[in-house]
Image (spheres, grey):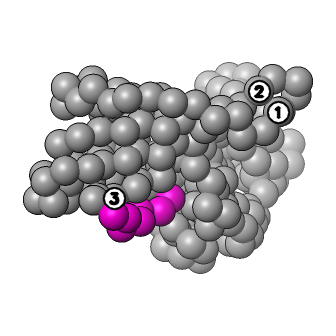
Amino acid sequence: MIKHCPTCNRTSDKTRFIGEFCEFCVTDRLRKHVPDIIKLSYCKRCGRIRIPGRHSEIDRMSLMSAIKMQLPKIKMESEVLSYDEKSANIEFMVAVPGGFAKFTKDIGLKMKHEICKDCLRKSSGYFEATVQLRGDAEVIQRVMRKLTTFLEERDAFVAKAEKVQGGWDIYTSDKRLTNVFFRLHELNPKKSYTLFTVREGKPVYRDTYAIRV
Ligand SMILES: [Zn+2]
Ligand SMILES: [Zn+2]
């Protein structure tokens, strides 16, 4: 029996039906639930966007997770087909009574400029530990380069590097990672701790690691 779509009167001999409605009406209705414009939190310093839990470089994956944060909470599969700085073409697959509806939508992207936590920390001179490197100038340079790369690959950073008498003082943003670096390179620093501040009733220490190379 030929079905007639209650909304647009298309017939099932010419159009695919999903349940009682034609596929055009089903996808039109779903498409309206997807916002036309999505605001992305964009850090103008590092060019990354906010996704759940962190910031990331812009690519299909990160764009999709940033967009998903703002989509209605209906169960759907979605994929970025293409994108540029102004819009993203997204394909959606939604389970509806009577089958699956598949449609695409161009979503406008609006960049909301902010400064991410990492960039903010960098610019505020935030640091957790000072590494005092003393000894052979060439070895010091090598350790500094390796430490910088090591930290940056793990979302940490060198806040400041200062040339001092007999070597360099390196200020790092992450105590734990700095110590992992020492272990990996079999460096055995002499450690000392200075009370820096008290946060939520707990003392916060800044560590100093003295290393002779
Ligand atoms: Zn219809
Ligand atoms: Zn940033």
Quadrant of the frame with the C terminus: top left
Residues marked 1 and 2 touching at CB (< 8 Å): yes
- Residue 86 in percent (x, y) is at 59, 76
Q: Quadrant of the N terminus?
A: top right
Q: Position of residue 135 (x, y in %)?
A: 19, 50
Q: Is residue 3 above or below residue 60?
A: above
Local packing at callout 3 (Cα closer than 10 Å; few below 14, some 14-19, many 20+) is many
Residue 129 visible at all: yes
The picture places residue 164, in percent across and down from the top left corner, at 37, 64
Q: CA distance from mark 2 to mark 3?
A: 27 Å
Inspect the image, locate mark 1, and give the three-letter code of the amino acid beneath it: Val
Residue position for label 3: 168
Classify 88 as above or below 13: below
Q: Which mark is residue 203?
A: 2
Which amino acid, by three-letter code, is at mark 3? Trp
In three-dimensional space, the C-alpha distance between marks 1 and 2, rounded to whole angstroms, equals 4 Å
Image quarter for residue 113? Answer: bottom right
Look at the image and tell me whether residue 77 can be seen: no
Query: Label 2 sits on what residue type?
Result: Pro
Location of residue 27 in the rendering, given as x and y in whole percent from the top left corner: 69, 47
Q: Which mark is residue 198?
A: 1
Q: Is residue 50 magenta?
A: no
- Magenta span covers which residues? 159-165
154 horizontally vs 68: left or right: left
